[in-house]
Amino acid sequence: MWRERATGALTARWMWGLAGFGLLVLWTVVGATWFLRTYLGQVTWDQVLFHLQHGGLDYADPRMLWRGFRCLLAVLLLTALSLCAVRRCARLLRVAAWSALTVGAVVSVNATVHDPCEPDPEGADYLASYYVDPGAQQWQPPTQAPDVLIVFVESLDEEYVHPSHPDAPLLPRLTQLRDDLQTLGSLRNLSGASWTMGGIFTALCGLPLQPVGLMSRNTLEYSTRFFSGGRCLTDVMAQLGWDTSFYGGASLKFAGKGQFLKDHAVARRFGREEWRRIAPEAEVEGWGVLDAGLVELAWADMQRPRRSGAPRLSLLLTVDTHGPMGTLDPGCTVRREGVEPEDVMRSALRCADKAVDSLVRRFVAERNGRPKVVWVMGDHLNPEPLLGDDDLAPDLDGRSVFHALARYDAEGHPLPMIDQHREFTHVDVLPTLAEAIGLTWQPAAHQLGLGRSLLTTPAQPTLAERDGLALMNGRLSCRSPRFQRLWLGV
C-alpha cells in the first residue's frame, strides 16, 4: 500500500512537472512572438534564424535586453499562475484551457513570423539562374582611383524626407543633400535585406542574406565562415589597392558583422569595444557609440597618413535611429522634443541627419588630388515606419529606402548625373557602386551578383523591373543550394 501511494505520488509529480514544462513552452512562444511583434514588427524566419545562428544578442541595446528580461519574468509568472489554475480546474475546463493556450501560441506565431518563399514551379534555383560571380570577372581599375565613402544610416526610410508638415522637416540636411546629389529611383527592400546585416551584405555582395546550416550536421562548419566562397565589393576593391575601413557605433560581435567584415577584406574595423579602448570618453548609450561622437572619431581616423598613397574605402554605419524608438544623443545640439517614443525618434533622426551631413560635406570638401564617390543609404526598412501618420506624408508609390549618390573629379567638381527613375533593390547597389567608382569588368559587364548597374546606357532592366518585385522577392526568399555552396566555398 505504501509503495503504491509513493509510486502514485511520484507519477503525479512527473505529470505536473511535464504539465508545467508544457505551459512554459507555450507561454514562451506567446511571449517571444509578442515581444518581436511589439518591438520589431512582423519578421521573417530568415531574420530569426540568422540572429540565432550568429548570436551577439548580449551586445544589443541594454534597453532592449531589459524589455526582454521583463517579458521573461511575465512568462514565468503566467506559467506559474496557469499551472496553479489547471491543477484546480475540472477536467473539461483543463482541456479547454490547454486548447486555448495552444491555439493562442499558433496564432501569435502566424501574426509575427511569415515566410515569403514562393518556390519556382519547376524547382529551379532562381538565385543560381541569374547570379554573376564577382570572383569570375576580370577587373580593371580606373585611371584615377577615387576615395569612396559609403554611409549606411540605420533604418532610414525615404518617407522621412517627405514629412506631413514641410515646415518641420525630419531630415533637413539630408533632404537638401539628397536634392544636391543624385537619386536613382525607388530602392525597394527584399526580405533577405530587411535587417542591418542583411541590408549591408546584400548591398555589398549583390544577393540577399540567408541563414545556412543552422539545423544541419554542418552547423559548426557553416557558422565559422561567412560567405567564404563569394566575393563582395570590399574584396574587389582591396585586391585592386584600396585601403578599407569600417566605422560602426554598435558592437562588431553582433549578428556576425565583424566576421563578415574580416572575411571580406575590410582591414580596419571599429565597433563599440574598439572605440571604448581608443576613446574612453566617447558617449556610449543604447546600441553603442552615438552618431555625433561616431562621426568625429571616424573623421579623425580618416585623416591618418596614407599607406603609399593608396585610395580609401570608408564604410560607416550609424546607430541613433535604431528601433524601436531611437536614442537621444547628448552630442547633438538639436532640440529634444520630449520623452515619448515618437519624440525620441524625431530627435534621433535630426541628430543622425546632422552627423551624416557633416561627415559627407567634410569628405567632399577635402582636397587631396583624388576623385571622390559618396553613397548614402538606409541599411533597410523597418516593418513599419518608426513615426506615426501625423509625421509622414501619404506614400502613394510604396515604401522605399533612402539613398543618394554623388561623384566628384579630383578638383572637387561634381560629375554629370544620369536622369532616370528606376525600380531596384539592394542587389543592384553592388554593380552601380562599382561603376560609379570607375571599375570595369568582363565578361559580364554591368552585372554583378543579382544586380544590374543603374549607370549604364542603354539601361538594363533590373530583376525587380523585369520580373516584378513580388516574384523576385518570393523566389529569392527560398533556400538556394547555390547560396549554401558559396557560403562554404565549395
Image (cartoon, helix red, strand yellow):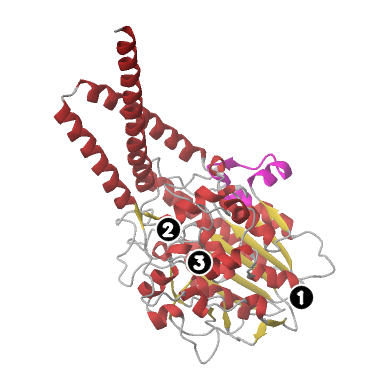
Q: Which residues are magenta?
A: 272-294
Q: Secondary structure at mark 1?
A: loop
Query: How many neighbours does mark 3 have within 10 angstroms: few (below 14), some (14-19), or many (20 or more)?
Result: many
Q: Secondary structure at mark 3?
A: loop
Query: Percent from the top left, x then y, of residue 154?
Result: 50, 56
Q: Is residue 256 left or right of residue 74?
A: right
For the residues labelled 3 and 2, say whether their Cβ atoms are less than 8 Å apart.
no
Sequence-earlier tag: 2 or 1? 2
Q: Secondary structure at mark 2?
A: loop
Separation of residues labelled 3 and 1 (CA atoms): 36 Å
Vertical relation: 62 (above or below) 213: above
> What residue is pinned by disc 3?
208
Residue 295 visible: no
Q: Which mark is residue 369?
A: 1
Q: Residue at x 49, y 75 (%)?
A: 183
Sequence-earlier tag: 3 or 1? 3
Q: Residue at x 62, y 63 (%)?
A: 488
* Residue extending furthest toward the right: 308
Give the quarter of the image for residue 336: top left
- Identify the amino acid type marked 3: Pro
Marks 3 and 1: which is nearer the front? Answer: 3
- Identify the amino acid type marked 2: Leu
Query: Percent from the top left, x then y, of residue 472?
Result: 41, 74
> What residue is pinned by disc 2?
170
Separation of residues labelled 3 and 2 (CA atoms): 30 Å
Marks 3 and 2: which is nearer the front? Answer: 3
Q: Is residue 66 left or right of residue 81?
A: right
Q: Nearer the viewer, residue 252 or 455?
A: 252
Q: Is residue 294 left or right of residue 345?
A: right
Q: Nearer the viewer, residue 325 or 358?
A: 325
Residue 489 visible: yes
Residue 285 belongs to magenta span: yes
